[in-house]
Image (cartoon, helix red, strand yellow):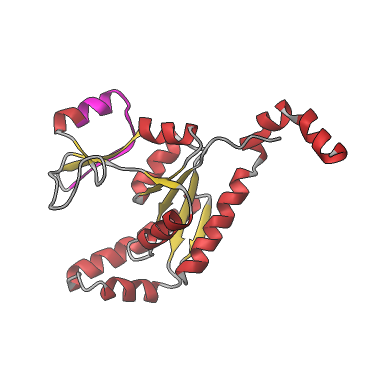
Amino acid sequence: MVNETKGLLVVISGPSGAGKGTICKKLMEKNNFWLSVSATTRSPRAGEENAKSYYFLTRDEFEEKIKCNDFLEYAEVYGNLYGTPRSSVMEMIDNGKNVILEIDIQGALKVKEAFPEGVFIFILPPSMEELKNRIIGRGSETPESLMTRFKSAYKEINYVSKYNYAVVNDEVALAVEKIQGILVAEKCRVDRIKEDILDNKEGIVHEQFYD
Protein backbone atom coordinates (compact mmCIF):
# COMPACT_ATOMS: atom_id res chain seq x y z
CA MET A 1 0.00 0.00 0.00
CA VAL A 2 1.44 3.41 -0.99
CA ASN A 3 1.80 5.59 2.10
CA GLU A 4 0.90 9.21 1.35
CA THR A 5 1.89 10.61 4.71
CA LYS A 6 3.61 13.88 3.81
CA GLY A 7 1.54 17.01 3.48
CA LEU A 8 1.61 19.61 0.72
CA LEU A 9 2.67 23.24 0.94
CA VAL A 10 0.01 25.12 -1.03
CA VAL A 11 0.84 28.73 -1.89
CA ILE A 12 -2.08 30.91 -2.99
CA SER A 13 -1.48 34.35 -4.44
CA GLY A 14 -2.69 36.76 -7.10
CA PRO A 15 -3.67 40.39 -7.56
CA SER A 16 -5.70 42.34 -5.04
CA GLY A 17 -9.41 41.72 -5.64
CA ALA A 18 -8.96 38.27 -7.19
CA GLY A 19 -10.62 36.63 -4.17
CA LYS A 20 -7.67 34.80 -2.59
CA GLY A 21 -8.89 35.24 0.98
CA THR A 22 -12.39 33.94 0.24
CA ILE A 23 -11.00 30.91 -1.59
CA CYS A 24 -8.61 30.08 1.26
CA LYS A 25 -11.44 30.37 3.77
CA LYS A 26 -13.57 27.93 1.77
CA LEU A 27 -10.66 25.51 1.40
CA MET A 28 -10.16 25.60 5.17
CA GLU A 29 -13.85 24.83 5.72
CA LYS A 30 -13.75 21.82 3.41
CA ASN A 31 -10.40 20.31 4.40
CA ASN A 32 -8.16 19.56 7.35
CA PHE A 33 -5.68 22.22 6.24
CA TRP A 34 -3.37 24.27 8.43
CA LEU A 35 -3.16 28.00 7.74
CA SER A 36 0.36 29.28 8.37
CA VAL A 37 0.63 32.10 10.93
CA SER A 38 3.08 34.84 9.94
CA ALA A 39 5.53 36.64 12.20
CA THR A 40 5.64 40.45 12.33
CA THR A 41 7.34 43.29 14.15
CA ARG A 42 4.27 45.50 14.13
CA SER A 43 2.21 46.03 17.28
CA PRO A 44 -0.92 43.94 17.86
CA ARG A 45 -4.21 45.55 16.90
CA ALA A 46 -7.39 45.32 18.96
CA GLY A 47 -8.60 41.72 19.14
CA GLU A 48 -5.40 40.19 17.75
CA GLU A 49 -3.79 37.32 19.67
CA ASN A 50 -0.18 36.23 19.65
CA ALA A 51 0.37 32.92 17.79
CA LYS A 52 -3.16 33.10 16.34
CA SER A 53 -3.26 36.35 14.39
CA TYR A 54 0.52 36.70 14.13
CA TYR A 55 3.65 35.84 16.04
CA PHE A 56 4.47 39.30 17.41
CA LEU A 57 8.23 39.82 17.68
CA THR A 58 10.55 42.68 18.42
CA ARG A 59 12.75 43.82 15.54
CA ASP A 60 15.80 42.35 17.29
CA GLU A 61 14.05 38.98 17.64
CA PHE A 62 12.96 39.05 14.01
CA GLU A 63 16.42 39.97 12.72
CA GLU A 64 17.97 37.19 14.81
CA LYS A 65 15.60 34.70 13.15
CA ILE A 66 16.63 36.04 9.74
CA LYS A 67 20.28 35.33 10.63
CA CYS A 68 19.31 31.79 11.67
CA ASN A 69 17.42 31.20 8.38
CA ASP A 70 14.20 30.69 10.32
CA PHE A 71 11.92 32.15 7.61
CA LEU A 72 10.78 30.66 4.32
CA GLU A 73 10.33 34.26 3.19
CA TYR A 74 10.26 37.71 4.72
CA ALA A 75 9.80 41.31 3.63
CA GLU A 76 9.58 44.80 5.07
CA VAL A 77 6.25 46.55 4.48
CA TYR A 78 5.59 50.12 5.64
CA GLY A 79 8.43 49.93 8.17
CA ASN A 80 7.43 46.58 9.69
CA LEU A 81 8.91 43.15 9.00
CA TYR A 82 6.69 40.18 8.04
CA GLY A 83 7.80 36.59 7.53
CA THR A 84 6.67 32.95 7.23
CA PRO A 85 8.23 30.76 9.97
CA ARG A 86 10.04 27.81 8.43
CA SER A 87 9.99 25.34 11.35
CA SER A 88 6.23 25.34 12.01
CA VAL A 89 5.43 24.94 8.30
CA MET A 90 7.91 22.06 7.87
CA GLU A 91 6.67 20.36 11.04
CA MET A 92 3.08 20.37 9.81
CA ILE A 93 4.06 19.06 6.37
CA ASP A 94 6.15 16.28 7.89
CA ASN A 95 3.16 15.34 10.08
CA GLY A 96 0.95 14.93 7.02
CA LYS A 97 -0.88 18.26 7.17
CA ASN A 98 -1.52 20.28 4.02
CA VAL A 99 -0.37 23.85 4.73
CA ILE A 100 -1.84 26.92 3.02
CA LEU A 101 0.09 30.15 2.59
CA GLU A 102 -1.88 33.13 1.33
CA ILE A 103 0.90 35.58 0.51
CA ASP A 104 1.83 38.24 -2.01
CA ILE A 105 3.65 37.41 -5.22
CA GLN A 106 7.03 38.61 -3.97
CA GLY A 107 6.76 36.32 -0.96
CA ALA A 108 5.48 33.39 -3.03
CA LEU A 109 8.49 33.53 -5.36
CA LYS A 110 10.84 33.56 -2.36
CA VAL A 111 9.06 30.49 -0.96
CA LYS A 112 9.45 28.79 -4.34
CA GLU A 113 13.21 29.32 -4.16
CA ALA A 114 13.33 27.79 -0.67
CA PHE A 115 10.73 25.04 -1.21
CA PRO A 116 10.30 24.33 -4.95
CA GLU A 117 8.25 21.19 -4.29
CA GLY A 118 5.37 23.34 -3.07
CA VAL A 119 2.16 23.76 -5.08
CA PHE A 120 1.95 27.34 -6.38
CA ILE A 121 -1.50 28.50 -7.49
CA PHE A 122 -2.22 31.89 -9.02
CA ILE A 123 -5.78 33.21 -8.63
CA LEU A 124 -7.01 35.24 -11.59
CA PRO A 125 -10.12 37.43 -11.93
CA PRO A 126 -12.47 36.59 -14.81
CA SER A 127 -11.62 39.97 -16.36
CA MET A 128 -9.84 43.20 -15.45
CA GLU A 129 -13.20 44.98 -15.48
CA GLU A 130 -14.55 42.54 -12.89
CA LEU A 131 -11.38 42.98 -10.83
CA LYS A 132 -11.94 46.75 -10.84
CA ASN A 133 -15.58 46.29 -9.80
CA ARG A 134 -14.56 44.03 -6.90
CA ILE A 135 -12.02 46.53 -5.60
CA ILE A 136 -14.54 49.37 -5.90
CA GLY A 137 -17.12 47.19 -4.15
CA ARG A 138 -15.00 47.08 -1.02
CA GLY A 139 -15.77 50.76 -0.51
CA SER A 140 -12.39 51.35 1.11
CA GLU A 141 -10.41 52.80 -1.78
CA THR A 142 -9.85 56.39 -2.80
CA PRO A 143 -9.63 57.13 -6.55
CA GLU A 144 -5.85 57.36 -6.16
CA SER A 145 -5.44 54.08 -4.26
CA LEU A 146 -7.83 52.35 -6.67
CA MET A 147 -5.65 53.38 -9.60
CA THR A 148 -2.52 52.22 -7.76
CA ARG A 149 -4.03 48.81 -7.04
CA PHE A 150 -5.30 48.45 -10.59
CA LYS A 151 -1.89 49.28 -12.07
CA SER A 152 -0.27 46.81 -9.67
CA ALA A 153 -2.71 44.11 -10.74
CA TYR A 154 -1.70 44.55 -14.40
CA LYS A 155 1.94 44.06 -13.44
CA GLU A 156 1.27 41.16 -11.07
CA ILE A 157 -0.59 39.11 -13.66
CA ASN A 158 2.63 38.94 -15.67
CA TYR A 159 4.03 36.65 -12.95
CA VAL A 160 1.47 33.91 -13.62
CA SER A 161 4.05 31.93 -15.62
CA LYS A 162 6.12 31.51 -12.43
CA TYR A 163 3.33 29.40 -10.88
CA ASN A 164 2.34 25.75 -11.35
CA TYR A 165 -1.36 26.45 -11.83
CA ALA A 166 -3.72 29.32 -12.67
CA VAL A 167 -7.33 29.27 -11.50
CA VAL A 168 -9.87 31.83 -12.69
CA ASN A 169 -12.13 32.89 -9.81
CA ASP A 170 -15.37 33.48 -11.68
CA GLU A 171 -17.44 31.58 -9.12
CA VAL A 172 -15.86 30.81 -5.75
CA ALA A 173 -17.34 27.31 -5.46
CA LEU A 174 -16.03 26.35 -8.89
CA ALA A 175 -12.58 27.82 -8.19
CA VAL A 176 -12.39 25.86 -4.92
CA GLU A 177 -13.45 22.67 -6.74
CA LYS A 178 -10.63 23.17 -9.27
CA ILE A 179 -8.07 23.63 -6.49
CA GLN A 180 -9.36 20.50 -4.77
CA GLY A 181 -8.74 18.62 -8.02
CA ILE A 182 -5.23 20.06 -8.28
CA LEU A 183 -4.38 18.85 -4.78
CA VAL A 184 -5.68 15.34 -5.46
CA ALA A 185 -3.54 15.19 -8.61
CA GLU A 186 -0.49 16.50 -6.75
CA LYS A 187 -0.84 13.73 -4.15
CA CYS A 188 -0.65 11.19 -7.00
CA ARG A 189 2.45 12.61 -8.70
CA VAL A 190 5.09 9.93 -9.11
CA ASP A 191 7.93 12.21 -8.03
CA ARG A 192 6.16 12.66 -4.68
CA ILE A 193 5.40 9.01 -3.98
CA LYS A 194 7.92 7.00 -6.04
CA GLU A 195 9.92 5.94 -2.97
CA ASP A 196 6.78 4.56 -1.35
CA ILE A 197 5.87 2.80 -4.59
CA LEU A 198 9.29 1.15 -4.87
CA ASP A 199 9.37 0.24 -1.18
CA ASN A 200 5.89 -1.31 -1.37
CA LYS A 201 5.79 -2.70 -4.92
CA GLU A 202 5.39 -6.31 -3.78
CA GLY A 203 2.45 -5.36 -1.61
CA ILE A 204 0.88 -3.36 -4.45
CA VAL A 205 1.19 -6.31 -6.83
CA HIS A 206 -0.28 -8.64 -4.25
CA GLU A 207 -3.26 -6.36 -3.65
CA GLN A 208 -3.82 -5.90 -7.39
CA PHE A 209 -3.77 -9.54 -8.42
CA TYR A 210 -4.46 -11.70 -5.37
CA ASP A 211 -6.97 -9.87 -3.17
> Residue drawn 67% across and 39% down?
190
From the viewer's perspective, tell me whether residue 81 is left or right of residue 117. Answer: left
Taking 16 as reference, is 54 left or right?
Answer: left
Q: Residue at x 38, y 64 (%)?
A: 19
- Whether 77 is drawn above or below 176: the answer is above
Count of numbered labels shown in the rendering: 0
- Identify which residue, 94 or 144, lies in the foreground: 94
- Image-quadrant location for residue 71: top left
The structure residue drawn at horizontal position 24% and vertical position 47%, both measured from the top left corner, is 53
66 in the magenta segment: yes
Give residue 88's position: percent from left, percent from top. 36, 33
Residue 167 pos. (x, y %): 50, 61
Query: Residue at the front extreme?
Result: 211
Give residue 75's position: percent from left, percent from top.
26, 41
- Whether residue 107 is in magenta: the answer is no
**On-image quarter of the C terminus:** top right
- Residue 207 vs 185, above or below: the answer is above
Quadrant assignment for the N terminus: top right
Left or right of 37: which side holds 97? right
Q: Residue furthest toward the right?
A: 210
Seen from the viewer's position, the closer of residues 149 and 16 is 16
Instruction: Please provide percent x and percent y for residue 109.
Output: 40, 43
Q: Residue at x 24, y 69 (%)?
A: 147
Q: Which residues are magenta?
A: 62-77
